[in-house]
Amino acid sequence: MKTKISRLAFLIIIFIPIVFLAQNAQFVGAKKCGMCHKAKTGDQYKIWQESKHATAFKTLQSEAANKISKEMGFGEKASEAPECLKCHTTAFGADASLIKSSFKKENGVQCESCHGAGSKFKKKSVMKDRAKSVENGLTEYADEKAIEEKCRTCHNAESPTYMEFTFKEKWEEIKHPLTKNEE
């Protein structure tokens, strides 16, 4: 019972802000972000594509993941278990009206998991102005400590496959440079 309550609290704390703080912005998917975030702007899309985040959902489709899901009592398929989907996909639990047709959960942990639903800040005219981007739902982090806190909402001992999470080391693998307009 205590575990179910803590899981529910986790979902509320993590996902309600994503949905409501973005002023009902919709999730557009990483491919939309990738239209601009290419080599000229810092190669953010390529960095994401080559990361484990991009294949996070795919890992849930393995026999090993299904075995863990079953053993943990989450169900037969990890790719359908809320306990797994909350960290292996973006926009888990979001109302269907907040999901654009361009968004695909199969793309795993996408840009909007950390940066917020992008429909209101995806336009170049908004993105070139940092303050305007934040005003339109882009999540801004005060410092690396704040980024680490976000990462640890999934990279923690609640995961049945948890391994030590060394933020500084993992951040080096996934961090992506700011464009000149975002500095």
Image: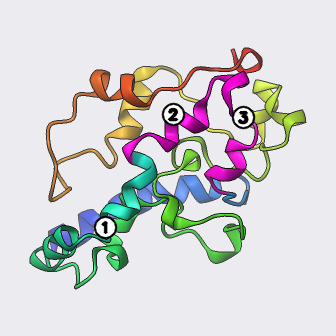
- Residue 104 image point, x, y percent: 58, 66
Q: In this view, does 105 lie to the left or right of 9?
A: right
Residue type for callout 2: Ile
Label 2 residue SS: helix
According to the picture, the residue beneath numbered tag 2 turns out to be: 47
**Badge 1: residue crowd in 10 Å (few <14, some 14–19, many ≥20):** many
Residue 5, by quadrant, is bottom left
- Residue 88 image point, x, y percent: 38, 59
The stretch drawn in magenta includes residue 33:
yes
The stretch drawn in magenta includes residue 24:
no
The residues colored magenta run 29-52
Residue type for callout 3: Val
Q: In the image, is residue 55 above or below residue 38?
A: below
According to the picture, the residue beneath numbered tag 3 turns out to be: 134
Q: Earlier in the sequence, mark 1 or mark 3?
A: 1
Distance from Cα at disc 3 to Cα at disc 2:
22 Å
